Amino acid sequence: MGGAWKIQAPGKINLHLRVGARRIDGYHELESIFLCLDFGDTLWFETGEPGYGESGCSIEFAEGSAPVWARALTPDRNIIARTAALFRERTGFDKSLRVRLEKRIPLGGGMGGGSSDAASTLIALDALAGTALSRDVLRDMAAALGSDVPFFLTGGAALVSGRGEIVESIETSGYASWRRGVPFWVVLVNPGFSSDTGEAYALLDEARRKGTAESGWTVEGEVLGKALEKHPAFWPYGNDFLPVFLIPGPGGDMTSSGKAYRDILEDLRILGADFSGLSGAGSTCFGIFSQKEAAEQAVQLLLRRHMFVELTIPLARSVKAVLQ
Ligand code: C5P
């Protein structure tokens, strides 16, 4: 593809994720710390031959994409095609679009892969079409595509609230002030199954109805953002989905996904993580390491048991399209 716009679409983890009550529109109020990672998908965009179906968009998978994920992302299930269709509808852009995607972020893994691809598609289309859309218009389209998409227009680290559309950047110059340079290392472990976000919210609601899971906020938003400056061992963060997955069933046994999360998180702690957690509504677990050597050793050991183990660092910059 000559003259293509290239974008690195970063993955994210939720260092913190509290879920409030279900609203009348069916969504839940959130309070979350999102962190962009230096690990993600790569996308190339260029205008192509006319006529690629209704979205006018063809998507091919670059070498390096996990074949099983590429097969799962048929055009009707691919948020990139939906993003292109929405952009066309809102701006009148009428050229066809060719997209090449190197898919590395696990599907249904709570790392915002689809949402990041969608935000990247919006940014690329704005550049390709020369529309120079305002932040507000882009944010509006992003929110229509999915709850996590607005965050990826901003990137870095952010306190996210509302349904996901209120994104307040956390000043990364002040963050992790206990250390200069790379503030910490992130070890990602995906257990090899995906988690359905809608189902996870339904499970959480049911557990709260039955009184087996707690509701409500424990820490003020402002305090949460400031806490990122502290050493990870002192972060006051948590994930409301995790205890729900760990609740034993009627027979007294934990579900297989609950057991997988429990074991991975325990391994991460034993291997020296200063903080560990579940991202989003699952299924990727992460460990935060203040020592690079410990993180590298943990990766080697975890790779013996899991297919997907990655070592990465936080990504401070926002997403930009680069013309190649
Ligand atoms: O917006 P998105 O398509 O990512 O959401 C997937 C599902 O997750 C929604 O249909 C809803 O059931 C649930 N959700 C929610 N509250 C949020 C975000 C998502 O209940 N804030």
Image (spheres, helix red, strand yellow):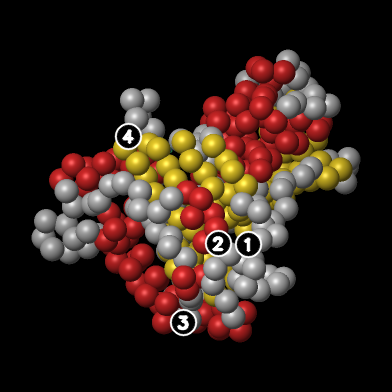
- Whether residue 70 appears in this view of the structure is no
Q: Residue drawn at (31%, 37%), measured in percent from left and top? A: 21
Q: What is the distance, in whole Å, between disc 4 and disc 2 at their CAs?
A: 28 Å
Measure the alpha-carbon separation of dots 4 and 3. Answer: 37 Å
Identified by mark 2, the residue type is Leu
Q: Which mark is residue 271?
A: 3
Dot 2 and dot 1 residues touching (CB under 8 Å): yes
Locate residue 243: give its quadrant.
bottom left
**Which circle's residue, 4 or 3, is located before the other in the chain?**
4
Q: Hey, what amino acid is under mark 1?
A: Tyr
Within-10-Å neighbours for mark 4: few <14, some 14–19, many 20+? some
Residue named by callout 2: 228
- Residue 52 occupies which quadrant of the picture? top right
Residue 319 appears in the figure: yes
Q: Is mark 2 within 8 Å of ligand 1?
A: no
* Amino acid tagged 4: Arg
- Judge: label 4 CB < 8 Å from ligand 1: yes
Under tag 2, what secondary structure?
loop
**What is the three-letter code of the residue carrying label 3?**
Leu
Q: Which of the pair 123/18 is nearer the observer?
A: 18
Instruction: Look at mark 1 in the image and give the residue it sits on.
Output: 175
Residue 127 lies left or right of residue 16; in this view the side is right
| Residue located beneath label 4 in the image | 22
> At numbered mark 3, what does the secondary structure look like: helix, strand or loop?
loop
Between circles 1 and 4, the one closer to the viewer is 1
Precedes in sequence: disc 2 or disc 3: 2
